Image (cartoon, coloured by chain):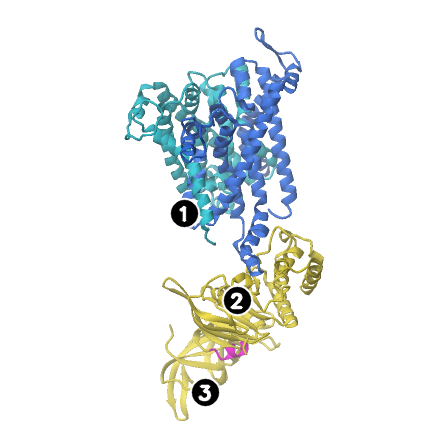
């Protein structure tokens, strides 16, 4: 292999993928950002003139603010719930012995491969006023009349947690896999009680995994579409369904583009900064 | 009263016998090595003493009290694991302080003891460094400091030097022995490296397939191995097949015509003789002894290593480099040794 | 490894029920003999599975989904394999940035991608076309394919290739006879993971699909918007069954946790 062709080789190999990404990823995204600055009218359609009116509308209209706030609330609630459920479960899975561990890992992570529509449909069935959840709670005496979980924020949070908690488990699981079991034994030999081992040795090492899992869950929850659309219904909008509305119902594409751009910027900033922070804080401790 | 007593200590996994009825007495301040090939049961024994594995049968008495009745976190033993098992998320000093924290020692006193321990292992400068940023040798020393600072009744070392490169290992061996002598803690070392065991220990426990083959001081085990396994495991050994016959002055060992007086009683018949390579003398072809022809010779600095063909098999000889001229490849020579340097046992070659 | 106590196991049991509940209920309702949403308490019936045959749009959507997924995955793998080899083999300026770019679709919300493609395609005349769908799917599944092929490429000892070259093989032969067979498990798993992700994709596709080119998840989504009846549960049950098979296959071939975590770099 001559030096000349060796220098060219990597570019030839990565070229096709690079071309595809540039044309099909950066270009469309750029076009969308551009679109947010265009004018629109019900009869004139999209007019390619620069204007800030869409941006002004989104940041000043209380309707949009309410939707963004709701999206944020839901995303935070889902993230916290996923942590509360996912972290212990990942730890429990880690301590299981081989045949069970593999089986339950499959059961817990497998649903990620099932279409979100099918999973959310199940929640729609469970959460309805005649749904199983209500029937169960009523028969247990915890409720007197069925609570409307469907078309409520609570319902969306429950269903979204179900959809996203596998990501949290995966992230924590990855951290747990990297632990040296002898370190736990070392702590025991130095006199640590089981709870001290958990608190002082295991948990601190798992924190980076927890944090990156939380970032993933938050990002996916904030931009979720199908689940809020099905469970939340037409009246309970989140950022993603709001954008859908503008694009496919109202047809005010520039306005929708503003929502999309905001979502993109917010998420990219959130993910990149938290990853940077996690890396900086833990880089000297872990690989 | 002996410091540590292992009585009939046994561990069985299903129908596999990992450790078979081990009896061992260790005195206070002694440095004892459990030595053997992988799978011989040495690590299992250590883990039973540490409390991470429950014995199938037998007892462990430490300073007169039953150790098996005590939980691992309360046994007060200092353990250095093979992978060091340092807490990666805290600094070296915090690692060393951990055991003291678990014992509820106040911060000021804790810091003082940690400084002392780190100074003992020569790592005071690295107190605030994280394990990831330390070399293997440095991590090993932190692990040692961490185990010693809690003033354990006993120090357990599980192949602590096996992850280090040869030169570092030699340095650490010397340091380990020095520290142990200074602090005086009773120590049990597990290793598969026979030179390491012989260099560091007051006594070695040679194990094979779960059974104890010999417990003795290193020099004793080396020159008077109790079994063929010990003889071949500790250092290099020559094995010659010959015959024990009745001579005019008593039984002798006949090796292809050359006869050696026997010091111990061995039944007549086929027999094997074991001689250390450094105890074999090479002389000119005209001398009395076993005929041999030099096959290869290798210069090793302080000595020469010879491989020779003899009628009784291939011989390995270590001759000191004292400046005298050495036989060449292909030359005919004579081999001899003192009968006392040879151990003979009945049996035929494998 | 210490065992899990009874408290832990109770939590685990509750959690697993939480995870399985919606899936099980969809499958249960799919077998109902009634004409409305209900649990099959009176007995099991296949009427709603047979009913699928009366809805050719679901069958067509299924077929389109399969074609779309197969095509996109193949294209994605075709881009990923050379890219992975280039990234693993050579140190060149921009290597890190390029890898980040290839993986970036993971960071972009699908909603935003859907909008972006909707606008972009309408500008270049690809709205509502099958080709448009393929291109958009290739972008979102590329990171999955790439991650697995990368892991396989890192894991492959390059010295084996050097041995082949020293014995006289040219580049094409080395690739065909040495490299490809060795990274094949990663390539196949990458293809399958990409396939599943394309098949399941709904958020982005809902923006760019047209009535004539609709995927199964989108068709189901639109149907559910109007009403929920056992028909969509029986379709979902079929989907779940199919996914279950693929899932077990992938786990056997590769290991599910490794799959999602990318197998780790060398």
Reply above or below: B265 against C251: below
- In the figure, the blue chain has which letter? A
Quick check: is B223 in the magenta stretch? yes
Q: How far apart are marks 1 and 3 (CA)?
A: 63 Å
At horizontal 57% and vertical 15% (from top left) the residue drawn is: A253
Reading the image, the residue beneath label 2 is: B190
Reading the image, the residue beneath label 1 is: A100
Tell me where the magenta segment starts and ends, as one range: B217-225
| Chain C color in figure | cyan
Please report whichever mark, 2 or 3, sits nearer to the chain's N-terminal start: 2
Instruction: Tell me the subunit letter for badge 2.
Output: B
Q: Of helix, strand and loop, which mostly describes the magenta segment?
A: helix
| Chain B color in figure | yellow
Q: Which of marks 2 and 1 is in front?
A: 1
Secondary element type, mark 3: loop
> Which of the 4 image quarters holds residue A267?
top right
Q: Distance between the residues labelled 2 and 3?
A: 34 Å
Reply above or below: B193 against C219: below
């Amino acid at each position: 292999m001559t030096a000349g062709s060796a220098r060219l080789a990597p570019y030839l190999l990565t070229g096709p993928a690079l071309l595809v990404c540039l044309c099909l990823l950066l270009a469309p995204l750029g076009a969308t950002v551009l679109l947010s600055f265009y004018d629109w009218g019900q009869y004139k359609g999209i007019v390619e003139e620069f204007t800030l009116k869409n941006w002004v509308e989104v940041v000043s209209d209380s309707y949009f603010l309410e939707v963004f706030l709701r999206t944020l609330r839901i995303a935070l609630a889902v993230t916290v719930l996923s942590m509360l459920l996912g972290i212990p479960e990942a730890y429990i899975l880690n301590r299981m012995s081989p045949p069970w561990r593999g089986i339950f890992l499959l059961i817990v992570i497998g649903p990620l491969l099932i279409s979100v529509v099918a999973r959310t449909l199940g929640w729609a069935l469970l959460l309805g006023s005649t749904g199983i959840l209500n029937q169960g709670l009523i028969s247990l005496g915890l409720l007197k009349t069925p609570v409307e979980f469907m078309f409520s924020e609570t319902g969306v949070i429950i269903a979204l947690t179900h959809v996203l908690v596998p990501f949290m488990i995966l992230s924590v699981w990855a951290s747990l896999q990297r632990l040296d079991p002898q370190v736990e034994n070392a702590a025991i030999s130095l006199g640590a009680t089981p709870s001290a081992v958990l608190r002082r040795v295991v948990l601190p090492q798992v924190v980076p995994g927890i944090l990156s899992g939380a970032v993933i869950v938050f990002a996916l929850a904030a931009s979720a579409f199908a689940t809020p659309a099905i469970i939340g219904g037409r009246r309970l909008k989140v950022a993603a369904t709001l954008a859908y509305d503008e694009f496919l119902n109202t047809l005010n594409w520039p306005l929708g583009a503003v929502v999309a751009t905001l979502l993109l910027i917010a998420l990219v900033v959130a993910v990149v900064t938290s990853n940077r922070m996690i890396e900086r804080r833990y880089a000297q401790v872990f690989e | 009263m002996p410091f540590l007593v292992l009585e009939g200590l046994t561990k069985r996994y299903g129908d596999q016998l990992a450790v078979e009825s081990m009896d061992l007495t260790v005195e206070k301040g002694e440095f004892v090595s459990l030595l053997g090939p992988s799978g011989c049961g040495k690590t299992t024994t250590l883990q039973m003493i540490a409390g991470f594995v429950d014995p199938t049968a037998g007892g462990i008495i430490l300073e007169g009290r039953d150790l098996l009745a005590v939980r691992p976190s309360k046994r007060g033993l200092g353990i250095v694991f093979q992978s060091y098992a340092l807490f990666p998320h805290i600094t070296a000093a915090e690692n060393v302080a951990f055991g003291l924290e678990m014992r509820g020692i106040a911060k000021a006193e804790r810091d003082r003891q940690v400084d002392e321990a780190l100074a003992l292992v020569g790592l005071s400068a690295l107190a605030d460094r994280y394990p990831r940023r330390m070399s293997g040798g440095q991590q090993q020393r932190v692990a040692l400091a961490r185990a010693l600072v809690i003033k354990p009744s006993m120090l357990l070392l599980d192949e602590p030097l096996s992850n280090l490169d040869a030169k570092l290992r030699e340095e650490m061996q010397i340091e380990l022995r020095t520290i142990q002598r200074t602090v005086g803690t009773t120590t049990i070392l597990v290793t598969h490296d026979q030179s390491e065991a012989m260099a560091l220990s007051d006594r070695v426990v040679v194990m094979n397939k779960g059974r104890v083959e010999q417990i003795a001081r290193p020099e004793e085990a080396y020159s008077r191995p109790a079994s063929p396994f010990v003889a071949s495991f500790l250092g290099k050994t020559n094995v010659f097949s010959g015959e024990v016959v009745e001579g005019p002055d008593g039984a002798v060992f006949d090796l292809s015509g050359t006869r050696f007086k026997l010091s111990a009683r061995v039944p007549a018949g086929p027999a094997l003789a074991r001689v250390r390579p450094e105890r074999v003398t090479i002389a000119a072809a005209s001398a009395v002894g076993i005929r041999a022809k030099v096959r290869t010779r290798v210069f090793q600095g302080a000595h020469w290593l010879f491989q020779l063909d003899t009628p009784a098999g291939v011989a390995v000889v270590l001759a000191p480099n004292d400046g005298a001229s050495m036989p060449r490849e292909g030359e005919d020579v004579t081999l001899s040794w003192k009968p006392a340097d040879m151990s003979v046992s009945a049996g035929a070659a494998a | 490894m210490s065992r899990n106590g009874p408290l832990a196991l109770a939590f685990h049991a509750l959690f697993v029920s939480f995870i399985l509940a919606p899936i099980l209920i969809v499958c249960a309702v799919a077998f109902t003999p009634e004409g409305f949403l209900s649990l099959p308490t009176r007995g099991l019936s296949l009427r709603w599975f047979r009913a699928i045959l009366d809805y050719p749009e679901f069958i067509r959507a299924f077929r389109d989904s399969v074609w779309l997924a197969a095509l996109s995955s193949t294209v994605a793998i075709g881009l990923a394999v050379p890219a992975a080899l280039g990234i693993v083999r050579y140190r060149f300026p921009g290597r890190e940035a390029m890898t980040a770019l290839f993986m970036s679709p993971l960071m972009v919300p699908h909603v935003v991608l859907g909008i972006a493609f909707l606008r972009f395609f309408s500008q270049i005349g690809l709205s509502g076309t099958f080709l448009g769908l393929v291109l958009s799917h290739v972008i979102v599944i590329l990171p999955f394919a790439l991650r697995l092929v990368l892991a396989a490429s890192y894991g492959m000892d390059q010295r084996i290739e050097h041995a082949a070259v020293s014995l006289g093989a040219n580049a094409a032969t080395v690739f065909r006879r040495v490299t490809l067979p060795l990274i094949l498990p990663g390539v196949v798993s990458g293809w399958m993971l990409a396939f599943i992700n394309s098949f399941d994709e709904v958020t982005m596709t809902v923006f760019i699909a047209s009535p004539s080119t609709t995927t199964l998840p989108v068709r189901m989504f639109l149907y559910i918007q109007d009403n929920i009846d056992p028909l969509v549960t029986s379709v979902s049950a079929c989907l779940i069954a199919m996914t279950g098979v693929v899932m077990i296959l992938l786990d056997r071939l590769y290991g599910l946790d490794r799959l999602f975590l990318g197998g780790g770099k060398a």
